[in-house]
Image: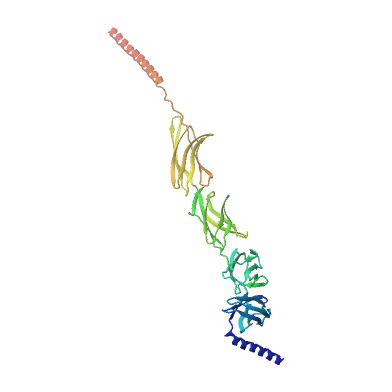
Amino acid sequence: MKLAKCSVFLTILALSLTACTAAGHAQVTLSVTLNPSTPLPGDIVKGELTIKTGLTPETISGVTFYSPLPVEPQSVSGIGSIPANSYYTLPFTLKAISPGTYVVKIYVSTTNGTVVQSFNVNVASAKPEVVISEPITLGEVNSVHFVLYNPINAYGVRVTPLFKAYPSTIYVVNNEGSFRFYPTKSMPLKFRIEFYDGFATNYHSYVQTVYPSYRNSSGVSVNVSTPHSTYMLFDVIPLSISITNLRTDTIYDLSVKVSTGGFEKTETLPYLNPSTTEKVVVNCPASKAGNETARVLIKYRDYLGNHYETEKVVTFKVLPSEVVSISDVSVERSGSGFEITGDISNSGWSKVYGVTVTASSNGKNVSYFVGTIDPSDYDTFDIVASNATKIIVTWQDIIGETHSVSETLHLVRQPVKVKESNAPLLVSAIGAVVIFAIVLVAVLRRSRGGERKSQFGR
């Protein structure tokens, strides 16, 4: 056995010495190409030996491969003459067995001697790997981007997440890929990686486990505010609702529902991108005196259809006094009726519209249209009516709801006093004068008659 090994060694040594001797005389050059250049264990490596002549033709009697890896063919003979400045190619195959570096030598026998060419076959242990560098957010739809570490220049790489992801299979382009993923807890991620090395027969498949970093979702921030803390009864309260998407994904179909007392209103937003804010203003009626509460319910969904909701509550005070009031009412007689005047005041924070003043009495109404009154402003009215028991003021707020206030009137129609005639008094006075005159005449006559009697008696 030792003699056999020694014989092989002496043969190789002799060929090497011959090659060294002939190298200076041979007019051929050798070059080798391999595909794949970095094979994996189990790969078939396709090689090609190129023999190129110089200024003179060359006759090639044989080619022999000395390789620690299986090689086909091991030797070729009778290649023949190659013209000057020409070349000849010889294909061969190697079988990669296990990781490592293997030295392969080629001996080319020519008429001028033997030429030796050595080359290395590097069988790699590294494989394409998925690398996720960015943290993944829990409770959100993540658009996960990964880079493929590809030391062997594998092609046709297909990555299949072994968990619920979209798409379920990723075809890697330019060593990059992405998928959507909704994690509910921190966990390692497994991928099946399939690829080809060199050509279609070198197919590989294996499972890689990746340990990404995770972080908690910041969710959606909702801020609700009112410009004032106190309102008059029947005033309008503008709720300012600010929604900020602190998530890393876009949210869709947002609904903003406001409820206060018996009032409800819903506003919608089609979507809200990450790190953006939208503001919604909802006008609510102050329909009940006291401490009022407004509830704001936000609902939305993510890209995968998962639904979320969050709620905020805001309180404000409503005074018992109506936002619209009647003051300085004055009533004066006017012909056969009355002229009623007064002021209509808006003590609220918002405009009132379509203000109308009506004097009402037994179903008979006379109206006066005032129109719009600005906040903290007033207007006057002037109504002429035959009679009225109350004044009614109606208006609409900016929501479109109609309200009214009234004030009772006490209008008394006073009877007309007719002056008594002085004729009876005059008749009585004349009669008295006449009677007095008659009595006076009678008295005078008696007095004169007495005087005459006394004269005759003398």
Q: Is residue 323 above or below residue 411?
A: below
Quadrant of residue 302 within the rendered picture:
bottom right
Looking at the rendered image, the quarter that the C terminus falls into is top left
What residue do we see at 47% from left, 38% from top? Answer: 369
Residue situated in front as seen by the camera: 421 or 295: 295
Q: Is residue 438 left or right of residue 403?
A: left
Q: Is residue 74 above or below residue 342?
A: below
Residue situated in front as seen by the camera: 274 or 42: 42
Looking at the rendered image, the quarter that the N terminus falls into is bottom right
Q: Residue furthest top?
A: 456
Q: Residue furthest bottom?
A: 3
Residue situated in front as seen by the camera: 144 or 420: 144
Q: Is residue 204 above or below residue 449?
A: below
Question: What colour scheme governs how the chains and residues are painted in the rendered image of this protein?
Answer: rainbow
What residue do we see at 43% from left, 46% from top? Answer: 377
Q: Position of residue 373 (x, y in %)?
A: 46, 44
Q: State the count of labels.
A: 0
Q: Position of residue 427 (x, y in %)?
A: 39, 18
Q: Is residue 408 left or right of residue 176?
A: left
Residue situated in front as seen by the camera: 222 or 276: 276
Q: Is residue 124 visible?
A: no
Quadrant of residue 219 within the rendered picture:
bottom right
Q: Is residue 79 visible?
A: yes
Q: Position of residue 440 (x, y in %)?
A: 34, 15
Q: Position of residue 391 (x, y in %)?
A: 49, 39
Q: Is residue 446 left or right of residue 262?
A: left
Quadrant of residue 62 within the rendered picture:
bottom right
